[in-house]
Structures are given as C-alpha cells and as structure tokens.
Amino acid sequence: MLVSVRSLFFRADEVPLIMKVYNLACDHNHRFEGWFASEEDFLSQSAERQIICPVCDSMKVGKLPSAPHLNLSAAKSNPAGGEAGLSGAAVVQFQQRLQDVARHVMENTVDVGAGFTEEARRIHYKEIPEHGIRGIASAEQCEELAEEGIDVFHLPMSMPPKRSLQ
C-alpha cells in the first residue's frame, strides 16, 4: 500500500482561508515552499530553527524573493466586512490535524529514503509484498512513477523524518 492522498481530505470549514506561502531555500540551494499561519509564525519558527530543508535536513533556511499573491476570493466570501480567514484556534486545529496525518504516515510506513522510486516500482509490479513506504523522490521521478500508473503524493513536513512527531 502506497501512501494515498485520500487520507488527506478535510471539511472546507476546517481549512484556513489565509496562509502565508514562502519560497524557501537552504544553504545548499535546495528550494521548497513553506506554509505559515502568519509572518510572525514564520519568524518564530525561523528563530527557533524549526524550519528544516526536506532534502538535506539543513536548518540554515532563508526566504527567497517572491511575487505577492492577493487572495481576493477570501475577501468576497466575507461580505460582513470582518476579518477574512479563521481564528487562531482554527489555525491551531488545522496544524494539529496536519501533524496527526504526518504522525499516521510516520507510524504506518517504512522510510526507504532515496530508494523510494525503486521500492514503489517493486511494490507496484508485485515483486515484493505490498506495504506502506515513504522516502525521497525528485519531481521528475514522481512524474515517471505517475506515467507508470503508480500513485504517490508529496507530504511536506517541517521536521526531518528521523525525529518523532511528539
């Protein structure tokens, strides 16, 4: 069993409407996205060195320049003129659910690391018994797997998989 995206569905009222998405890079120039509840959340996590490169586990991560994106649909959906988005409690609840999903994946899969692509193929072609796996694959490798009919998904995690999820 490969990790399935079906386990990641949330009710629409549980998902925060406003998230800060930053383009980040580590000191080895590995580029990735980081999603944060606010600028303060990013600064706090950055100061505490909680932002870790998903490729090399480097904690030397910085924000890259990016173009702003205005989410005008969120403003339209709140005609009362109140603050768009969800309360801090809702954001915390959403983050807890993401952490629960990550914990479930960690507890129910085997980390095959850089051998993810080969292991996924071996499972798909029934060379080995089906079991849950997680690991590292490039975007190109994921495209190749998709072309072969092998479903995978990217689960960004802010902590390296080597540490427990509390």
Image (tube, grey):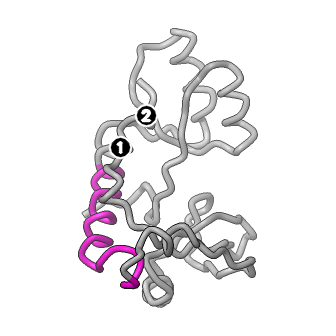
Distance in Å between CA atoms under marks 2 and 1:
7 Å
The local crowd at label 1, few if under 14, some if 14 to 19, many if 20 or more residues have their Cα within 10 Å, is some
Who's the residue at 43% across and 33% down the image?
Answer: 4
Foreground residue, 25 or 57? 25
- Quadrant holding the N terminus: top left
Say if mark 2 contacts mark 1, CB within 8 Å. Answer: yes
Who's the residue at 40% across and 36% down the image?
Answer: 110
17 in magenta: no
Q: Main secondary structure of the magenta part?
A: helix
Horizontally, is 48 left or right of 139 in the view? Answer: left
Q: Earlier in the sequence, mark 2 or mark 1?
A: 2
Foreground residue, 126 or 33? 33
The disc labelled 2 sits on which kind of residue? Val
Horizontally, is 56 left or right of 109 in the view? Answer: right
Q: Position of residue 16 (x, y in %)?
A: 39, 67
Q: Position of residue 52 (x, y in %)?
A: 53, 70
Q: Position of residue 54 (x, y in %)?
A: 57, 60
Magenta residues, as a range?
Answer: 81-103
Q: Residue furthest top?
A: 126
Question: What secondary structure is marked by label 2?
Answer: loop
On residue 105, the disc is 1
On residue 84, the disc is none
Give the answer, above or below, for where 9 lies relative to 100.
above
Who's the residue at 36% across and 80% down the image?
Answer: 80
